[in-house]
Image (tube, rainbow, N blue to C red):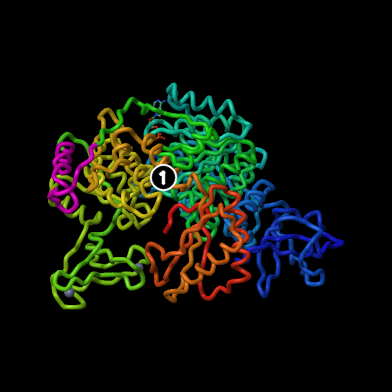
Amino acid sequence: MSAPFEILRVAVPTPLRRSFDYLPPTNTTLTDCRPGCRVEVSFGRQKLVGVILERTRSTEQPGHKLKHVLSLLDDAPVLDADLLELLRFASAYYQHPVGEVVSAALPALLRQGKSANAEPAIYWQLTPQGQQVARTPRRAIKQAALLSALHTAAGPLSDAMLKARVVGANPVLQRLHDLGWIEKVTVAPDSTPSSASPTAGPALSDEQAAAVQAIQAALDQFGVFVLEGVTGSGKTEVYLQLIAQQLLLGKQVLVLVPEIGLTPQLLQRFEHRLGSAVALWHSALTDSERLQTWRSARDGTAKVIIGTRSAIFLPVQDLGLLIIDEEHDASFKQQEGFRYSARDLAILRARARQIPILMGSATPSLETLANIGRDRYTRLVLQHRAGGAKPPHFHILDMRRQPLDHGLSMPLTQRMREHLQANGQVLLFLNRRGFAPTLLCHDCGWIATCSRCDAHLTLHHSDNQLRCHHCGTQRRKDPVCPVCKSEQLIDVGVGTERIEASLHKAFADYEIVRIDRDTTRRKGSLDALLEKVRNGERQILIGTQMLAKGHHFPNVTLVGILDTDQGLHSADFRATERMAQQIIQVSGRAGRAERPGEVMIQTHHPEHPLLHTLVEQGYDAFAQAALGERQLAELPPYAHMAIIRAEATRPTAALAFLQDVAKLLVKFAPSTLQHFGPFPAPMEKRAGKVRAQLILLSTARTTLQKSLQQLLAKIETELPSRSVRWSVDVDPLDTY
Ligand code: ADP
Ligand code: ZN
Ligand code: ZN
């Protein structure tokens, strides 16, 4: 119906796939109720914080049923028009309820209704006594970080800025204050202290300069640039130069990095080069620290914001450039709830703002390479490593019939010795933590399995536990078989813990460090371990994919990749792509210095064509071959995919539900929409739930989009939920 008065359409955080209409609040003028402002509304029996999407005169709700908004919470929108548009698009594209999408874009404290406006600014500066403090206690990393920031700034820095940069800064600032090393100053808002002066970087190589120029020539317009170069080729230098130029223009820059890539080293490097106006956004921040970063992005005090996935929703006012480092990284895709791709949304955001976006990677995703092939993205290449370091040599080690010493072949251990004797460090990569992935009874064949998942329990020696890596269940390992009481229990297979143990025996003269989730659980422990590698206290590293990203080990001369067989023979269509990226990423840790590195790849499938292409001709050749396979199979990026996943406690319920979904689908879907399944998920039972999936594919994005939208509407009206939980994943990164 058409109303004689204006109505507010509000995104309310509920799982319902729609927005809700309200009358304006009684005590506020309508013009203040701008789209993007938060409102408090009553919803059922609850009071919820929603966001105004638009003002309208038409509503499907009968007029007498409309309730008034309880109150308007903002005097200015918390989501500007661009962001609001992006979120509405994302809600439709990823088929996720708009209320939850909008809510995901706000810091927790804003979701709870806290004021978006900055509190009166507090600034800190060094006291004369603080200026004298040359050293802080060795363990006081945060104290040191804060003091050094204030030293470099040579003037006051805002409380907000310091908190955005050092996690958990609050008590530390208090402590420094108590020590008499720092003091509070109030600074008039128009005399915001300038940050430290930036330091000049190295003179750029020709390739780097060409990359910088290409983007500089295209500022103030939308364009996607892909900076392709191995680790150490100088990509970060290109970012820094471009950012420095943006800062001179008074613009802000948003840099997205993978979850694991936001290291203290990276932050230090950025701050050192750019001055101190760098703010952080990541999951280890507290809610109030996040709000600080959000505010400093909005009011423009943070000039550079480095953040993980959800930083794409920060209200950066004067965004001049967007950068995504390691664009291929899976952590840019949210894997639960609102399953968005921050990389893809970043491209849309850049387009809306008419600014360039720069995506860097040693191993661009096949999606990105396909877009380069279609001339949608501009490819910029850094062929040569900065400082002239040579690329590593690859060897494929045929593991068939090789005697194995706990996962290590003879040729590999031999080569390790040679490298160690020549004072090189060795890095071993195995993407499986724990001691052994399987515990087997030699007498009766019993295998330790998880009662809640279709999975073996992994044996962890250090605390004698059997753990499920899928649901977290754990229990003590009994000394005897629970079935036949035999003591002949055998550990089958190798994990990082076992490799570490055998290395201790085989390489007793060297120090070994293991880096995986088990050894880095405590905050700060990863950095401590990495430091031991960097300063040479440890010569052999064994670790999982935590090693593949971000960290530089200049003295590593040999990389051993212990198991590629998983990646070559997985059911997931992206498995080979991911394996190739891992091999290249891990290999990139070696041979940065004068000494060329060497990479040994253990496999039982030495003849695998893609593996050969990868090591003989490099990642690009591999990617072209892999793209060819995808095209033949009509898989992404040559088709668009969505997965509907369902799970239930009752064994057949999820599959039965998806069979009904498939029946609905065939009634209306065009022939250009293919569907596969439903079938049980590759790991059918997980955490006590039985799971199934239905895959939809179309070569036309709009066909997939339209069909999905219709399908979901029909599911909601025609298929009662029947205690089945289901979700939609558009552009899924894996098919599990
Ligand atoms: P990437 O981001 O591709 O891994 P970096 O930008 O970190 O590469 O560069 C690797 C190393 O080489 C760094 O120590 C960096 O300071 C140095 N470097 C990069 N570009 C140059 C250059 N043009 N001249 C000298 N050193 C450089
Ligand atoms: Zn037994
Ligand atoms: Zn389990």
Q: Under tag 1, what secondary structure?
A: loop
Q: Is residue 161 left or right of residue 592?
A: right
Q: Given the image, on which type of amino acid does mark 1 rest?
A: Thr
Q: Image quadrant for the N terminus?
A: bottom right
Q: Is residue 576 left or right of residue 131?
A: left
Nearer to the camera, 538 or 184: 538
- Check residue 574 for magenta coloring: no
Nearer to the camera, 305 or 196: 305
- Check residue 419 for magenta coloring: yes
Query: Residue 190, how many percent across, how many down?
Result: 67, 39
Check disc 1 and report the residue beneath it: 263
Asked whether residue 569 is in view, the answer is yes
- Taking the spot 17% from the left edge, 34% from the top edge, the residue there is 422
Q: Which residues are magenta?
A: 395-420
Quadrant in the rendering for residue 305: top right
Query: Residue 194, how many percent across, how many down?
Result: 58, 35
Asked whether residue 243 is in view, the answer is no
